[in-house]
Amino acid sequence: MSAPGPERTTGFLGFDLLSVSFQAAESKREQYRRYLEKSGVMDTIASALVALYEETVISSRPPISALDFIKLHLGGAGPEPADADTLRMELADLQQKNNLLMEENKELRNKYEVSPEEGAAE
């Protein structure tokens, strides 16, 4: 008596159809694995997992959320470094403009002797 499972059928020219479909799926899986390795995905994921391990076990300070740690390590939780530099420069520029406007506002209030409370009520 044979083991339970899918019934083996012999297809055209005597090929075992179950074996052929399994080999095709295995071949596609292997191609996909090679694609991930060539594109650097496997190394990146491995380095993220190693960093999580080091953070958790070696330093004995586990992150609050392992998933958030992995996202952050993979770069999914923040801008690209070039974008971050641009944003920092824009922030500094806007802070400088804000300071100038606040100073101008203060001078105008002093000139017209309007208190901040009165100006807000208008």
Image (cartoon, rainbow, N blue to C red):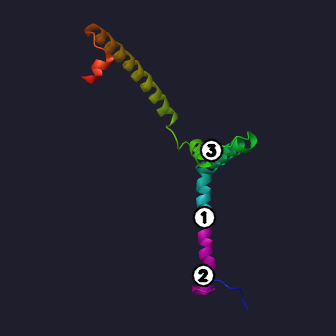
Task: Give residue 114's quadrant in the image.
Answer: top left
Mark 1 highlights which residue? 29
Q: Provide the secondary structure element on which disc 2 rests.
A: helix
Quarter placement of the C terminus: top left
Q: CA distance from mark 3 to mark 1?
A: 34 Å
Task: Give residue 59's quadrant in the image.
Answer: top right
Q: Percent from the top left, x then y, of residue 31?
A: 59, 61
Quarter placement of the N terminus: bottom right
Q: CA distance from mark 1 to mark 2?
A: 18 Å
Q: Percent from the top left, x then y, of residue 66?
A: 63, 48
Q: Which residues are magenta?
A: 7-28
Q: Give the label on residue 64, or none.
A: 3
Above or below residue 25? Residue 109 is above
Q: Give the label on residue 71, or none.
A: none
Type of amino acid under label 2:
Leu
Q: Which numbered disc flags the more N-terminal residue, 1 or 2?
A: 2
Q: Percent from the top left, x then y, of residue 91?
A: 43, 26
Rendered residue at 71%/42% (across/down)? 54
User: Is residue 10 found inside the magenta-colored segment of the image?
Assistant: yes
Q: Provide the secondary structure element on which disc 3 rests.
A: loop
Above or below residue 15? Residue 70 is above
Q: Which numbered disc flags the more N-terminal residue, 2 or 3?
A: 2
By secondary structure, the bulk of the magenta-drawn segment is best described as helix
Q: CA distance from mark 2 to mark 3?
A: 49 Å
Q: Nearer the viewer, mark 3 or mark 1?
A: 3
Mark 2 highlights which residue? 17
- Residue at the bottom extreme? 1
